[in-house]
Image (cartoon, helix red, strand yellow):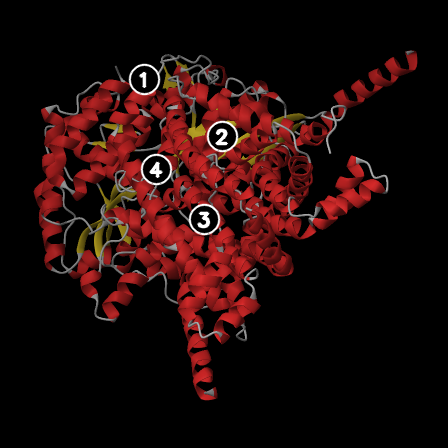
Amino acid sequence: MLTKKRWWVPWAFLALPLIMYIIWVLVPIGRTFIYSFSSWDGLSKNIDFIGLDNFRMLFGDRIFITALMNNIKWFILFIIIPVPVGLGFAMLLDMKLPGSKLFKTLVYLPMTLSFVVIGTMWSWIYEPQYGALNSFLDAIGLDFLITPWLSDPQVVTFSLIFAAIWRQIPYVMVLFLAGLKNVSKDQVEAAYVDGANAWQRFWNIILPALRPSMIVAVTVSIIDSLRAFDIVFVMTKGGPFHSSTVLANFMYIEAFNNYRMGYGSAIAVIQFAITFGFIILYLLNVMKNEE
Amino acid sequence: MKNRKLSIRMMFYILSLLIVIVWLIPFFITTFTSLKSMDEIMASTSWWKPPQQLVWENFANSWEQGNMKTYFRNTFIITVPSVIGTLFVSSLGAFSLSFYKFKMSKIVLIIFVAGMLIPFQMLLIPVYKFSQQTGLYDTFQGVILFHVAFQLGFCTFFLRNFMIGIPKSIFESAKMDGANDFTLYRKIALPLSLPAMAALGILEFTWIWNDYLWALILLQSDSLKPVTLGLVNLQGQWVTSWNIISAASLIAAIVPLVVFLLFQRYFIDGLTVGAVKG
Amino acid sequence: MKKLTLTLTILTLVLFVFSARTLVINSYMSDPAPKEVFSKLVADFEEMYPEIDVTVNTFAHEDFKTLLRTWLGSNNAPDVVTWFAGERMRYFAEKGFLEPLDDIFPNGFEEEFPEAFRTASAYQDNIYFIPQSWYWWGVYYNKAVFKDLGLEIPKTWNEFMAVNETLKENGKIPMAIGTKFLWTAGGWFDYLNMRINGIEFHTEFTAGKVPFTDPRVKKVFEYWKEMVDKGYFINNHSAYSWQEAANRLFTGEAGMYLMGQFIKDVAPENVKDDIDFFRFPIIDSNVGVYEDTPIDGFMVPKNAKNIEDAKLFMKYIAGKESQQYFADELGRLAANKKVTPPDAHAQAGMDMILESDGVMQFFDRDMDPEMANNAMNGFVEFMMFPNRIDAILENLENIRQRIYN
């Protein structure tokens, strides 16, 4: 389709998007990389370059290690929980029961609320003395499970992840609802007629047909877990004393509250590197399917 | 047999109902809070319980006090052009990457995808400085242009995947009828991508509507701020009026919800097709 | 060509004539009451100077702190900004981002403001900050609870401990505190340090000149530990914002709360009169009596576009009339010394301060922001795990070395 004469055609179409992208995204990324090698405070006119010192400091910074560990927790839990639960919700709500449209809308609601509100409401659920969760546990006799959900350093990250998952599940559910539309009803019917039970139908027909949606769901969950910021920032700001901090939160506080722009940029660079690692993995997967 | 089927259905029905109710608890709490007076909140111990007295004025107050009218208007001014802009610009890129075979196309695609996954806080200071230098700071255009550019990664990738699925035969016959490249784009690729565009439109609308950080960094004047910033302004230096904030955010949540309801059909169908090609 | 030049000249003249002088003010007064009062003050200023067109942009408090540094560093800074006195202001003055304001006062700063406020408003010899209002900190207590248990206001540390013990014995939370956002713990450090070691030491400490491992610093934590060990603080305080913890004081479940005067802003109507304060108890009678009095006010960025009019505004906001109005409407204390306190509660606070030997701004306003953040995190960790104090202090000392190297 492309002759030698017309090699410029695809680039003509790409011109506008690429230029905008370079200006607003790629150049700023480059700038951040440059800042990460400096001790800039984000304010002064002059920038001192200090080579790899920021990165050296980072690896000895126990807050950085905590953030990294926490992101790993986010990462694991974000894959294990939203994906199956979202799938379960999708299958449950896909049954043509009366009111399923209403249900889908209701489950989508968390995505429409602002993070400030989500954070505050969950803080009240988690409140140690009178909060909804502990009151409920007390009421049903499980009072040995009562914990200060947001002030116990061992537990706090999990409390935050759970609130974030509450918001993540609708997103994943919608992805799967879409995917389920693609499952061939005829195939399922045929399998039923052939005597396959519910589990076999699910495993052998539905699940493979859902593979594309699964890839998107897992990828999105990976990215969101490594980028987690809003919930942490609103609910605990990384506290108590850094025990719930994640990379994005740590980066923000260092760069903007502690006036350490250079250091914060270094954190961002590392966060980018980790996420980028997963991009490559994802892309290899996706490109493979296309050939 | 029929009875068994019926009771299974009932079970699933009740199960769904229960799940959704538990699911919505934080949402109920938000609603309760929005209907309480601050005095009631500060004087009681359980902040999550239903209100003793319904204070409907909170909603009116949040509209007034929160200057919601202006902020809503601003959010529309920012969101609608951003969504249209990013859909249009990314469709150009998507067409190029899907229709033409050229050496750099894989690399360009990777560039767009990579940008999709950037932790955006990283861009705060450079983008701020850039908008200052170009005079785009504190303008609607500045925020809109940024959103259009920033969303290009995801949108280009998504649309490109969708467009790959359009049968080449349609293009072939159009070419034989004498269509040039731009016509192919405008009259064939675009119309056939409408479901995907609608799906993207909803997602982009929700994300940009709820954007907080970029509006914060790129806008200064009160008169330009969107709802997300307006909401946070209801948090005082020491004192937070939780009831007003809850009321205001419920109002703010209505718009993305309505958009979801209106475009639900396309949304679900569209996402399918993109996902399958992925 | 001639026509073009003519048109352009006319256009320029027209624009020149119709361009009002604009003044941009960025403020963090996002609470509804102060916001309204401030907009009235701005309206009055506009009446005095009709050629000036004032725009006020309001921001949430946390966001303002983040954005201020970006504004100050840009070429497009706003003309006036709200801010805090003390180190927080000096941080920017030192880097040359603020405009000196001495020429606003023909007869000097002390004509309008108490001499005690000079250090908080100046850097080296110049004034960079115009104070508007200030408030005090004290131990707020629930009068009804005290009355029920027959408690008297404690004046010394021992009396204070006894009050705590009585409260605890009767099933009350002796001391409420919400440490989720850290600064409440800073308040505790301030008071213990000022009572034990005095104000010169505290000033040196917040200037980063004292090692965290100094024995005088450790002494502060010994007293603090006494309260922690005896369980006088509310449980799980790191789960609460200050406001959420205040709720316990209002319901009567807690007896006391070391807090700033703004706690009254949030007290429900039926409880407001039950909440009063007393001075933080004396630990060492040989040490002077010092208090925290955070001062809020305004500054002018060096890169502001309209410095002239900014100074006009600052002169206005420093004056008695505007300060009296602000104080009266909001029940605050005005910085201007000619202004009378608006109500009995404010008068009581004012009296307490007048009887004191000196004042500081507040922990996170007196200390370098990064050091303060780390220190407060350390304080909260100490309050939850008091036995870790040595490790915490060592860690903070390392950070101090790095920051103040």
Marks 1 and 2 sit apart, C-alpha to C-alpha, by: 22 Å
Q: Are marks 4 and 1 in contact (CB under 8 Å)?
A: no
Question: For the residue marked with disc 4, what is the amino acid?
Answer: Tyr
Q: Which mark is residue B124?
A: 2
Question: Which residue is denoted by mark 3 in the rendering?
Answer: A115
Q: Are marks 1 and 2 in contact (CB under 8 Å)?
A: no
Judge left or right: residue C324 versus residue C192. right
Image position of C252 with respect to A260: above or below:
below
Marks 4 and 1 sit apart, C-alpha to C-alpha, by: 43 Å
Residue under the point 17% across and 32% down: C392
Question: For the residue marked with disc 1, what is the amino acid?
Answer: Asp
Marks 2 and 4 sit apart, C-alpha to C-alpha, by: 35 Å
Q: Return the residue nearer the eye: C277 or C193.
A: C193
Q: Which mark is residue A87?
A: none
Count the numbered circles shown: 4
Question: Which residue is denoted by mark 1 in the rendering?
Answer: A53
